[in-house]
């Protein structure tokens, strides 16, 4: 696991942080911070805006920050460079670790982030754990919250980019004011879009996109919409994810529906009718999985959809554009040809 250095750095920071807080079990919650604030603006009194070089991150830290760096080789021999920022105040301790590897990240980032959190919570014997996926435009993120043996509230956030992993850590007393400070610290983290793992924004040229939670990759314009929801298929609610790019008289969309076991017989025909995918145009396949092509045309537009069935999922790969727009027809071919199931 290339992230072993991240686990080591967090474990170095946490014991010292936890010793500095008072025992006080909580009776208040920790709100989900709202993203989109501009931490680069004026900081509150006693807070400092920090932009460490070679990290691609801007944030605010209470009481200023001590900075250190570390370089070396990870367990697979890859060179890494880590920057660590720490701030210790009477209300708790706050830290940020940014690690960049030679050759970029290796493996599934969601699994690696979960392993880092698991190691932290197990070795530090943190209880009352709550884990949440964070959707940050262009980045994968997760948050793990817990309580240490001395009553400290611990918040761990991990953000995954193309070349870097960003880890924010807050250890504070379980008091309302301290929790608000931890929340402000976490919400102030702003990442440079140049390291985004997923193209997200205005649609343009086809971009390489990998979705580890849904096990597929594809080339499509930058995402303008991403969501998850339950959908009813065959009389039961199923988890689903939608990834969409819309703009310039064209729309690209991939929908993934998860099943507890093999999808039921007839699911392709059910989804064809339920989603109004059009007329059958023959069989196809992707990464060895069987599929079927559907086409639809109207006076103003045309489109194509392909449905692929695996042992536990159904993928609906769909494109639509203004009729007669030859440039979109060419892109659609590249979009469908690039789709891979992992």
Image (cartoon, rainbow, N blue to C red):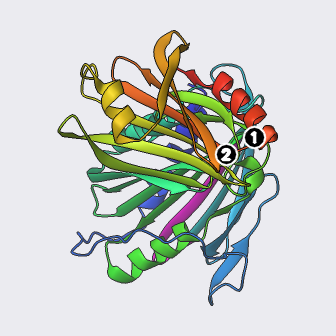
Tell me where residue 246 appears, x and y as whole percent.
64, 53
Tell me where residue 147 appears, x and y as whole percent.
30, 58
Residue in view at x 70 percent, y 53 percent: 249
**Mark 1 surroundings: few (<14), some (14-19) or many (≥20) residues within 10 A:** some
- Residue 9: image quadrant is top right
Q: Is residue 55 visible?
A: no
Q: Are marks 2 and 1 in contact (CB under 8 Å)?
A: yes
Q: Name the residue under label 2.
A: 321
Q: Is residue 40 visible?
A: yes
Q: Earlier in the sequence, mark 2 or mark 1?
A: 2
Inspect the magenta stretch and tell me whether residue 90 lies in it: yes
Highlighted range, magenta? 88-99
Residue in view at x 57 percent, y 60 percent: 95
- Residue 77: image quadrant is top right
Residue at disc 2, secondary structure = strand
In this rendering, the answer to whether 22 lies above or below 290 is below
Residue in view at x 35 percent, y 36 percent: 273
């Amino acid at each position: 696991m290339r992230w072993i250095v991240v686990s080591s750095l967090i474990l170095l920071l946490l014991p010292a942080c936890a010793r500095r807080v008072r025992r006080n079990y909580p009776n208040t919650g920790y709100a989900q911070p709202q993203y989109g604030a501009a931490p680069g603006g004026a900081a509150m009194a006693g807070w400092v805006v920090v932009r460490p070089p070679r990290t691609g991150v801007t944030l605010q830290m209470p009481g200023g920050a001590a900075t250190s760096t570390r370089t070396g080789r990870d367990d697979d021999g890859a060179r890494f460079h880590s920057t660590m920022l720490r701030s210790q105040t009477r209300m708790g301790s706050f830290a940020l670790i940014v690690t960049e590897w030679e050759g970029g990240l290796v493996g599934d980032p969601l699994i690696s982030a979960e392993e880092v959190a698991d190691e932290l919570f197990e070795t530090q014997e943190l209880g009352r754990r709550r884990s949440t996926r964070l959707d940050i435009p262009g980045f994968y993120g997760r948050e793990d919250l817990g309580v240490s043996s001395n009553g400290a509230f611990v918040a761990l956030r991990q953000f995954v980019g193309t070349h870097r992993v960003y880890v924010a850590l807050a250890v504070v007393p379980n008091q309302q004011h301290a929790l608000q400070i931890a929340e402000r610290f976490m919400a102030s983290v702003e990442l440079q879009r140049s390291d985004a793992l997923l193209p997200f924004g205005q649609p343009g040229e086809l971009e390489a996109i990998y979705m580890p939670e849904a096990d597929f990759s594809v080339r499509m314009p930058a995402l303008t919409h991403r969501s998850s929801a339950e959908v009813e298929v065959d009389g039961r609610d199923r988890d689903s994810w939608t990834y969409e790019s819309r703009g310039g008289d064209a729309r690209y969309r991939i929908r993934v529906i998860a099943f507890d076991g093999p999808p039921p017989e007839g699911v392709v025909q059910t989804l064809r009718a339920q989603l109004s995918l059009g007329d059958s145009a023959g069989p196809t396949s992707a990464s060895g999985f069987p599929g079927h092509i559907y086409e639809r045309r109207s006076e103003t537009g045309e489109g194509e959809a392909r449905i692929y069935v695996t042992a536990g999922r159904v993928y609906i790969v769909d494109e639509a554009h203004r009729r007669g727009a030859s440039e979109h027809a060419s892109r659609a071919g590249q979009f469908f040809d690039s789709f891979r199931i992992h």
